[in-house]
Amino acid sequence: MAAEMNLDFRKSFPGRVTVEARLTMMLEQSTALILFGPSGSGKTTILRSLAGLEWPEQGSIRFISRTWLDTTKGIRVVPQDREIGYMAQDYALFPTYSVAGNIGFGLDHLTSGARQHRVAEVVDLLQLRGMERLRPRELSGGQQQRVALARAIARRPQLLLLDEPLSALDAPTRIGLRGELRALLKKLALPSIIVTHEWAEALALGDVISIVGEGRILQTGRPQDVFSRPDDVTIAKIVGIETVVAGRISKITQGLATVEVGGVMLTAIAADDRQEEVFVCIRGEEVTLERNGAASTSARNHLPGRVVGINSLGAMARVTLDCGFPLVAIVTRSSVEEFGLVAGQHTIAAVKAGSVHLVPRRDS
Amino acid sequence: MNWTAVVMTLELAILTAGLLLVIGLPIAYWISFSRWRWKFLVESIVALPLVLPPTVLGFYILVAIGPHSPVGQFYTDLVGHGLPFTFEGVLFASILYSLPFTVQPFSSAFDQVDRRLIEASWTLGVSKFKTFIKLILPLSVTGVVTGFVLSFAHTLGEFGVVLMVGGNIQGVTRTVSIDIYDEVQALNYSAAGEMSLFLLVLSYVILLLVYSLNRSVWAAWPQK
């Protein structure tokens, strides 16, 4: 069952950017929509407005057949009646309740037997068995995150809203939990909206991504499309990753992975996750161009390619190459002139192994 | 020792603290969570008894509940006698007099509850009232106990307001502090000393309780 979501509202705060969100989207059963943008861009405000924790002064929010907000008709559905699961950035676990108490907190409408049954179900699903009696402060960050998720899904919500679900964790845990969270979201078969400012998280978790900047939703699409083909310079600046292509790890030796992308072999630092299917991500600034037959450099990857297009970005230029896959290099205008680069010309792109970022690509 | 006065005072203090618990919780909740811009007007009124001389407060209460006031007339029609110089009148005055001692600890405890916890509860479908009972109250337990105990202790030592509103009727409105004053007037220093010592020790024990509770809430009040 697809769920239609329709937002069109305005929310302003004194001294902060005014949020003007407009989005219509069909959320399939297990679609994860990412709201991606820098801090202060308004993505959390959009999420909180969806949760009913902020009241936009003008506009409407509809989800499936229900109107959650319509300022012209005076409709304001309180968070209690929205059937959502909401997870705050710092998880907001109730310190005076145990793990089981937290998970069952919103289940007072059930009989005590049904409540215990549901809590046990969710405890199993999130692998929290044995921790039911512990207090939140006795748990590790990753465990707290799982309890918060368990609590959010216990009431069988229609929509899951996650605000920076991994940012409260330390880096190694965070990377490990990305795949786990993705698998869980798929298993729940529940549409979700996830706020993040990390591009790797957006790629690892999302089916659809909306770029948020200056309070507006600027572009929406498949993550790899939005990342590699931003509509304009503002969006390109926000995403910051010019090349995102699908690849496959063919072998890993001594911490270096060989990745096959469009018939070309690239060397990259191996990701922790041992998954074969990956997104290969390369920042345009980390691609250098060499004249044909230039002296060898320490870069592991030398990719012969053809110039497809050159766009000026002020002092810099965005050079799109076809190296078997589209690769974008951001170089200075003076190098373009010095090299005499024009469309159709052949050149060699050099990329260090450390600049080829691999994000495990989840199974859709 | 004037045990009648002691019993009367304890009765007054317990009733005042108990009723203030009921009245103070919603007022404190409103002060902590309302976004009304003129909220400070109400906050200032609640805090007024802290700075006003008890005689001034007592005077206005006396006028307000007197036989010529609408409140006084209504009460007389209802029960058959007036409020001034009765236990009920003193109780009413005590409640107003101790209001800030209850409401301020309550609302400062509510202020300290992380708003994100409250929001999390709302998104879990839990109503505002149930969120208050299940989440805010257990997290504010020290503040609530402090407010209760302070209003109790404050009522124990009341003098000016009681004298203005209740007069000095043995067994009805004569509190311990009025009794002490009477004994001193009669140059009966040993009786005054006994009663004073009683109040001193009782007040000290109560404050000990409050401070030990605020020191380590988890040790003194194990929670669910």
Image (cartoon, rainbow, N blue to C red):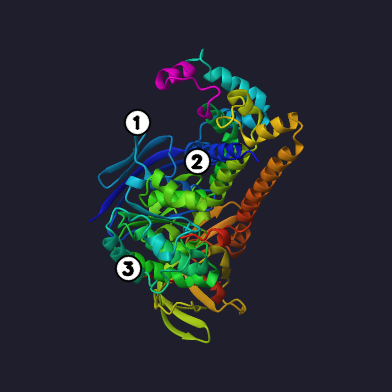
| In contact (CB < 8 Å): disc 1 and disc 3 | no
- What's the amino acid at mark 3? Ala
- Does mark 3 fall on the same chain as mark 1? yes
Residue furthest out toward the left: A1
* Relative image position of residue A64 (x, y in whole percent): 27, 47
* Relative image position of residue B28 (x, y in whole percent): 52, 39
Q: Is residue A352 something one can see in this rendering?
A: no
User: In the rendered image of this protein, does residue A97 appear above or below residue A291?
Assistant: above
Between residue B17 and residue A15, name the one nearer to us. B17
What is the chain letter for disc 3? A
**Whole-Å distance between the Cαs marked 2 and 3?**
41 Å
The disc, 1 or 3, on the residue closer to the chain's N-terminal end is 1
Horizontal arrangement in the rendering, residue A161 relative to residue A37 (left or right): left
Name the residue carrying label 3.
A120
Report crowding for label 3: few under 14, some 14 to 19, many 20 or more residues within 10 A (C-alpha).
some
Name the residue carrying label 1.
A72
